[in-house]
Image (cartoon, rainbow, N blue to C red):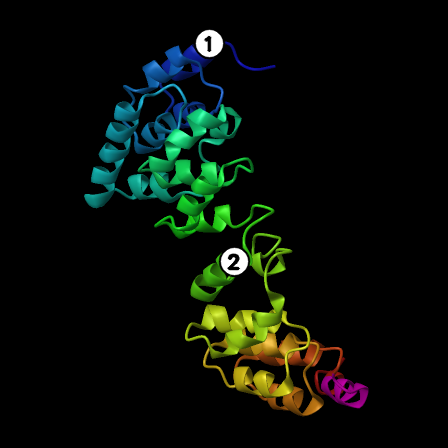
Amino acid sequence: MPFTAEQFGQLVRSGDLEVQRAVAENPHLPTETVAHLLHVDDPHVRVGVARSRHVDGETRDRLYALVEAERAAGDIEAEIALTWNSPGPTWLRDVPLAERLTYLDCPHTEFRRVLASCRDLPEVAWRRLDDDPELAVRRAAARRPDTPPQVLERLVRAHGDVFHIRPLHVDHPNFPRHLLRTFTDEPTPNARYLALQDPELPVPDLRRLATAAEPFIRRGVARHPNITATLLEDLLSDPDPQVTDEAAANTTLPPPRMYRILAAAGL
């Protein structure tokens, strides 16, 4: 059962800062509770209140500006409040489309990021979000079902993918997967790494990536299903122990070699 306005008020009046922070993050706060929280001198509370649907744009800007100033002065709590991984103003998804579209011009990234997670925006809005100055917004927009292939390719070539969020952008139905092997020529390691998402990446490309300075790329090569026994043997001598572990665990490694590795480890 949701809290009543009186219960929220009691929590705010408790004076317990941790409780007030938790209350400020609650998306169901009534207007009167938000008004009480405006007087709490804490960056986490200010950011939580700034995300509320019950504050106007001027108040929201003022709250963010206060916390930004605190961060600029070296306040670590202000830094955490502004960068903590939060779902943001999720209530925005439930308001009418016309109201949501007014947030295309919102100066605060998390509002545009939540807007980009909607699925019913007009094409003009998607064009704006695909070109948003913040990467987090562009990545959120690219997760819509009908993202154009060129938008996905441009995003991933420039910034790589986010491997802790599934599905990957390269797994999007519209992503031009036939172009993955061309990523081996990209200047940034995060983009080059994505060539390994092609399960049939040619062996010459795997050899090139196996010489990368970045261990995470060599680890990806060691896991690749198209790797040769010869290249695996090379990676078994890699200076990075995680690379050798991945190479030793690759199912394409010849069984006699696996047995020798196990015997050497006393297993």
Q: Please tell me in which quadrant of the rendered image residue 179 appears.
A: bottom right
Query: Are circles 2 and 1 on residues that touch, CB within 8 Å?
Result: no
Q: Which quadrant would residue 198 be assigned to in this image?
A: bottom right
**SS under mark 2:** helix
Residue 1 or residue 61, whichever sits in front: 61
255 vs 229, nearest the viewer: 229
Vertical comparison of 53 with 262: above or below: above
Q: Nearer the viewer, mark 2 or mark 1?
A: 2
Identify the residue position indicated by label 2 in the image: 152
Q: Residue 133: give x, y in percent of width and height.
A: 34, 50
On the rendered structure, is 65 left or right of 208?
left
Residue 254 lies in magenta, yes or no?
yes
Q: What element carries label 1?
A: helix
**Residue assigned mark 1:** 5
In the rendering, at what x and y percent does residue 146 appear?
Answer: 58, 48
Q: Where is residue 158 in the image (x, y as percent from the top left)?
A: 43, 64
Q: What stretch is highlighted in magenta?
A: 253-261
Query: Where, by quadrant of the figure, is residue 199 drawn?
Result: bottom right
Q: Residue at x 31, y 40 (%)?
A: 77
Question: Does any portion of residue 256 appear in the rendered image?
Answer: yes
- Look at label 1 and name its amino acid: Ala
Any magenta on residue 149? no
The residue drawn where x is 52% and y is 74% is 183
Tag 2: amino acid: Leu
- Give the quadrant of the N terminus: top right
Q: Residue at x 48, y 10 (%)?
A: 7
Q: Quadrant of the C terminus?
A: bottom right
Residue 248: % across, % down: 69, 80
Position of 134 with respect to 225 (left or right) is left
Q: Is residue 86 visible?
A: no
Q: Which of 111 and 23 is in front in this view?
A: 111
